[in-house]
Structure formats: C-alpha cells, structure tokens
Image (cartoon, helix red, strand yellow):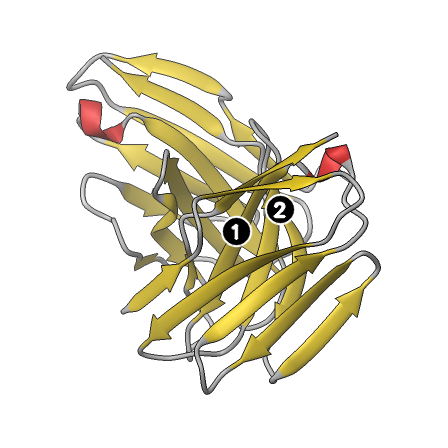
Amino acid sequence: NAGVTQTPKFRVLKTGQSMTLLCAQDMNHEYMYWYRQDPGMGLRLIHYSVGEGTTAKGEVPDGYNVSRLKKQNFLLGLESAAPSQTSVYFCASSRQGGGTEAFFGQGTRLTVV
Amino acid sequence: GQNIDQPTEMTATEGAIVQINCTYQTSGFNGLFWYQQHAGEAPTFLSYNVLDGLEEKGRFSSFLSRSKGYSYLLLKELQMKDSASYLCAVINNAGNMLTFGGGTRLMVKP
C-alpha cells in the first residue's frame, strides 16, 4: 500500500519556468490538500479539494493552480515560478474532512533560482 | 482566520516527561490535531481532540480545553527517537481546512 506519493522529490527551476507537481493516493480518499513548509512558518495550506472535480483556495493560493480531474490525483501547478516559491511542498489526503486523519506524502523540495 | 501558537524549540532529557503547549484563536473550531515530523520526513498523525479532556495513547497524551483555546501534548519516558518537530493543527467548522502552527522542535538529550 503506497499511501500518498509525490512526484518529483526534488526540482530546481529557473525564475519564470513552469512545472506541475503530481500527488497520487491509493486510499480512495475524498479530500486532498497541498501545503508548503518554510522554516519557522509551519505548514501553510495552498489549495485543497473535497472531491473529484472540486478545488478551493487555502491560506496562500497566489501563484499556484490545482486540478483534481481524477479522485486519486491532485496536481499543483506553478505557471511562472518565483524565488519566493522555494519551499518544501507536501501533499496530503484524508478519507473525509473534520476529525479524520490526514496522510502526507514524502514532500517535494523545490528551489527556484 | 486561525492563529496558532506553540514554542519554537524545547529540550528534554531521555527518560523524562515533556509537555508541549499550543494555544489557538480561531473563527471556527472542529477539533485539534497533533502531528509528529522527523527532520526531512512527512508529518505523521499522533492524536485528535474534539472534546475537552485528556486522550491517552501509550507514551503520548493530548489534552484540550476549548474554553481556554489551549492544548498540550505530553510525552512520557522520552526516547532519543522522540527528537522531532511536533505540529499543532486546528480544523475549522466546515471540516475542510486544517491550519497548522509553526511547530515545536523537541531535542532529546542523553
């Protein structure tokens, strides 16, 4: 059982380049989330989805877009990368909202130069 | 919005007990989570409290007081492997947004 898998694990981008981070879960979870983690700031929610075909903004959505075309996949896109987007990105999923446990992927370390 | 505060760092001795506090001010509340995160790894679930009181799970316990906007994570019989960051997080009323505090980095010394 793979759980939550993120691709890629590491990436270096030049300012202005675009890329897509892929998150896949095999637990049939309804909810999926994208977070970024920066030193001293904890995890901050970028976007989330409560089901296939739905997305919503989190705390820090600017500069990112997401899609949930299939229930098991949640994609995070950066259209024009900026150095401020250098961070570790975590995807998570949960069976439903509320008090259900969220399972996290191993993270993607992104550096924008 | 949500405002969640926890100490940045703590140090404790192997075999001892440590309490990590978390205070929150939120516009909506539907429960509080604690997660553990080892350096370079993903966060993993430790506990969930939605009602006031203490929840015990082995060496770890979590307490919640909703009226005070306060929670703590208690770690007993500390082991070196408990050196990690401990993240406090609050879920909103709608149950769709989990907001994290900055995390507390715990260092366990021999």
Crowding at dot 2, Cα within 10 Å, few <14 / some 14-19 / many 20+, comes out as: many
Residue at left 46%, top 27%?
A108
Residue at left 57%, top 63%?
B33
Label placed on residue B87: 1
Q: Nearer the viewer, residue A105 or A66?
A: A105
**Labels 1 and 2 share a subunit:** yes
Residue B71 in picture, x, y percent from top left: 54, 70
Marks 1 and 2 in Cβ contact (< 8 Å)? yes
Quarter of the image with the N terminus of chain B in it: bottom left
Q: Nearer the viewer, residue A58 or B13?
A: B13
Residue B68 in picture, x, y percent from top left: 44, 82
- Residue that numbered label 2 is attached to: B36
Tell which subunit mark 1 falls on: B
Quarter of the image with the C terminus of chain B in it: top right
Quadrant of residue B58 within the rendered picture: bottom right
Q: Is residue A48 left or right of residue B14?
A: left
Image vertical order of residue A23 relative to residue B18, above or below? above
Quadrant of residue B41 within the rendered picture: top right
The residue type indicated by label 1 comes to: Leu
Residue A97 in picture, x, y percent from top left: 53, 69
The residue type indicated by label 2 comes to: Gln
